[in-house]
Image: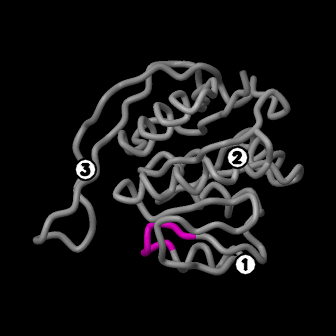
Amino acid sequence: MAKILILTGDAAETLEVFYPYQRLQEAGYEVEIAAPEKKKLQFVVHDFTDTFDTYTEKLGHTWDADVAFRDVNPDDYVAVVVPGGRAPEYIRNDADAKRIVKAFFDRDAPVAALCHGPLLLAAAGVLEGRTTSAYPQLAVDVETAGGTFRDGGDVVDGNLVSGRAWPDNGPWMKAFLEVLEKAGL
C-alpha cells in the first residue's frame, strides 16, 4: 500500500488534518502524520463569524503523531500533505520539515497544501515560479517567496494542489486525488 505523509504540529486546524487523513485512507493509502516530535498533538478549530475580520480559534481534537520530522525518509512516501492552522507558522522554521518538502518537489511528487500550509513551502524555497492558493491574507507571503497567488479552492500547478482553508476540503482533495491518479499512484 502506497504511503502518504502529513506534515503538521500543534495548533493545526482539525478539519484540515482529519479530512485528508481519512479521505486518503478511504482511497486506499496508508497515511502517517509527522510532527516536530512523536507526541500527542493538540489541534484547533478555526471558524468564521460575521463580527471578526479573520477566523476565531478554539481547542480541537488531539491526535498522536506517528513520526518526528527528523526520522522521516521522504523516499518512503509517494506524496505529502501540508494542512494549515497555525502549525505551519512554526514548523516552517524546522530544518527537517523544509528538507522533507524540498525532497518531494525535487522529485516532482504530489504535494497538497491548504490554508497556512504554503508558509512551509515558502520557507523551503519551492514556490519560485509556482502558482498556489492559500488563506487569502497570505497572498503577500506567496508572492514574496516568488510564487503567484491564485484565490481558489482547487488550484493545481503540476504536482502542487492547494486551497484556501477547510471549506475547500472537498474540491482540494478531489483535485489531489486526480493528481495522484495521473501520477500512477
Amino acid type of the residue tagged 1 in the rendering: Gly
Which corner quadrant holds the C terminus?
top right
- Residue drawn at x 28%, y 35% as measured from the top left: 60
Mark sitting earlier along the chain (3/1): 3
- Residue 51, compared with residue 109, is above or below; it is below
Q: Residue furthest right?
A: 107
Q: Which residues are magenta?
A: 133-138
Image quarter of residue 51: bottom left
* Mark 3 to mark 1 CA distance (whole Å): 30 Å
- Residue 29, compared with residue 182, is above or below; it is above
Amino acid type of the residue tagged 2 in the rendering: Leu
Bin the neighbour count of mark 3 within 10 Å (Cα to Cα): few under 14, some 14-19, many 20 and up.
some
Viewed as shown, does residue 157 lie left or right of 119? right
Mark carried by residue 57: 3
Q: Secondary structure at mark 2?
A: helix
How many marks overall?
A: 3
Colour scheme in the image?
A: one colour
Mark sitting earlier along the chain (2/1): 1
Indicate yes or no whether the magenta region holds residue 141: no
Amino acid type of the residue tagged 3 in the rendering: Glu
Q: Secondary structure at mark 3?
A: strand
Pinpoint residue 37: horizontal percent, then vertical percent: 59, 24
Mark carried by residue 180: 2
Q: Are marks 3 and 1 in contact (CB under 8 Å)?
A: no
- Residue drawn at x 51%, y 47% as measured from the top left: 83
The residue under label 1 is 146
- Residue drawn at x 70%, y 46% as measured from the top left: 180
- Residue 119, compared with residue 180, is above or below; it is below
